[in-house]
Structures are given as C-alpha cells and as structure tokens.
Image: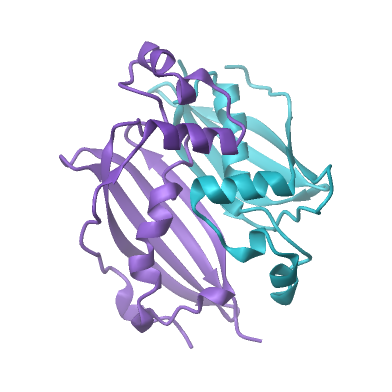
Chain colours: A purple, B cyan
C-alpha cells in the first residue's frame, strides 16, 4: 500500500525538551571510538569557545530518531517498519551541539515518492534550543521496500 | 588542510555494534541477531548505517583538524556493511577529496567508504570550517 501523500508538508508540535548530557556525549563518543579531547573534557571544549563538551556530528540521532516516531508510527501514514531501510541522512549545522543544551524538535514530512515498487519518505527535523535558537536541521530518508 | 588525505581504516566488530546500539538507542534487531537479519534477506547482522556515518565523521573531523568543524554532512546508504561474528569483524576504508573551497573559508569534501572493496555510501559529502 502506498504511503499517504497527504502527509507531505505536515508538521508536528514541538517535542518535549531533550537535555544534552555531558556523560551522554562521552558515552556516544566512546561508542564511535572518538577520542578527541573536546568530546570528553570540558576544559578542552572551552578552549575552542564552547560552554561544555561538544557532541560528534552524528550525535543528534540520539534524540531525533526517537522524536520522528511521532510521524512513522502514525497508522494513517501506512508505513510498515519491518520493510524499512535507512536511505539517506543529512545534518546541516548552525552551531555544534554542546552539553547543557536543551533542545526541542519540530518534525515535518518533506517528501513522499514511489519508484520501482519502493516508497521513499523524507522527514526533516528542525532542532532549536528551548529559547528558539536554531542549532541543526536533520533530514532522514527512509525506504520502504516493496512487498514480495 | 591539504588537498590529499591518507585513507583511514576503521575496524567494526559485533561488540562495537552492541556498544553503538546502547549509546544511540537504536536497538533494531538486524544489528545484533543473525536469526532476524537473515529472515529479512540480509547476509547476517549488519552495522547501523548511522554507525558507519559516525566513523566517516571521525575521518572528516580528523582531516579538518577540529572535532567541531562539521557544518554540513550527508550520505546515502547504498549497501549494507555485514559484520561477521569473528574477532576481526570487518573493515571500512574512508577516503576524501576536496571538491571546493568557498569564499567563506568552508571546504567541501567528497567522501567514499568501502567495505570488502564495495562502496557502502554514495553521494557522501561534508562541508567543514577550518580552524
């Protein structure tokens, strides 16, 4: 069943604030083997002009993947998650994510297309501080493979 | 930043996938269960696409010389990265070439990542701000 085209252009209410923790950044950096001092040591991060440890570039998936469930788990969309693979991913930064940030996400559906029996869903997450400062925009394209 | 880069090689084992699952919150079973991965037509457990993207991101920040250098970063996951249940696991090799330097001092890199000689990413690029 094709995805519901009426989702294109829709936005969802801002999510509850996500508190970026110093230990979470350290844990994520360790998990990807990133040993840069600025990911682990607040003093090293301050030397680069940041208030606390800096997050690696793909860190926002820690909270954006969870928040995008408000789209992909809506039964009206018609997405069968067991047939979904990750197609594309993009991050566009205004500034790095730093420990202590309180971030909210506004999710939208940018595009839904079909090609070769597969369906493609592009979501966009605008990540801002609770005060409204833009931090990063995250796009994710999911591919729902055609049924056998 | 120079225009030529030494390729960077990253080893990926099952233990890395378990650690990444915990840190990222992505517990999709195709990244830890051979039984489930093969039942959906995969050769076995595969790496999280976002784990591969994170490793390539490490290469990018290393080349840029700063961990907070990334302004824009995008990839397409063109092929899965199977990770066998062995001590050696598998390897991903990352290369980059400079595509352009903008007037604002930003550098755009074209990236490749290969596993067993096959490209696992396409349309992969990063824009970085030099320090």
Residue at 72 percent across and 76 percent down: it is B39
A117 or A136, which lies in front? A136
Total number of numbered discs in the rendering: 0
Can you give x and y, in whole percent of width and height, for residue B2 in the image? 62, 17
Can you give x and y, in whole percent of width and height, for residue A38 in the image? 46, 20
B84 or B59, which lies in front? B84
Can you give x and y, in whole percent of width and height, for residue A110 in the image? 35, 64
Q: Quadrant of the C terminus of chain B?
A: top left
Question: Toward which corner of the image does residue B29 lie, by quadrant?
Answer: bottom right
Up/down of B131 relative to B86, above or below: above
- Determine if residue B129 is in view: no
Q: Quadrant of the N terminus of chain B?
A: top right
Question: Toward which corner of the image does residue B31 lie, by quadrant?
Answer: bottom right
A47 or A145, which lies in front? A47
Up/down of A104 relative to B5, above or below: below
Residue at 58 percent across and 44 percent down: it is B53
* Left or right of residue B73: residue B96: right
* Left or right of residue A11: residue B73: right
Can you give x and y, in whole percent of width and height, for residue A116 in the image? 60, 78
Residue at 61 percent across and 45 percent down: it is B19
Up/down of A86 relative to A129, above or below: below
- Determine if residue A57 is in view: yes
Residue at 50 percent across and 79 percent down: it is A80
* Left or right of residue B82: residue A139: left
């Amino acid at each position: 069943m094709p995805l519901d085209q009426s989702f294109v252009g829709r936005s969802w209410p801002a999510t509850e604030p996500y508190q970026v923790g110093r230990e979470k950044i350290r844990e994520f950096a360790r998990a990807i083997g990133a040993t840069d001092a600025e990911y682990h040591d607040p003093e090293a991060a301050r030397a680069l002009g940041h208030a606390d440890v800096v997050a690696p570039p793909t860190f926002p998936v820690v909270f954006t993947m969870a928040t995008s469930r408000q789209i992909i788990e809506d039964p009206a969309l018609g997405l069968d998650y067991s047939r979904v693979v990750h197609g594309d991913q993009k991050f566009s930064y205004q500034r790095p994510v730093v420990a202590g940030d309180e971030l909210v996400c506004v999710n939208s559906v940018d595009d839904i297309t079909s090609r070769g029996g597969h369906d493609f869903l592009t979501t966009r997450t605008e990540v801002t501080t609770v005060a409204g400062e833009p931090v990063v925009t995250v796009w994710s394209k999911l591919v729902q493979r055609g049924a056998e | 930043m120079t225009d030529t880069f030494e390729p960077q090689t990253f080893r990926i084992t099952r233990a890395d996938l378990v650690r990444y699952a915990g840190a990222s919150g992505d517990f999709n079973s195709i990244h830890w269960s051979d039984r489930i991965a093969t039942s959906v037509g995969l050769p076995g457990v595969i790496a999280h696409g976002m784990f591969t993207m994170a490793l390539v991101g490490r290469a990018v920040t290393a080349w840029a010389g700063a961990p907070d250098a990334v302004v824009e970063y995008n990839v397409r996951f063109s092929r899965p990265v199977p990770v066998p249940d062995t001590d050696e696991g598998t390897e991903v090799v990352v290369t980059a070439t400079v595509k352009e330097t903008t007037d604002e001092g930003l550098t755009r890199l074209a990236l490749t990542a290969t596993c067993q000689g096959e490209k696992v990413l396409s349309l992969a690029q990063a824009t970085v701000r030099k320090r």
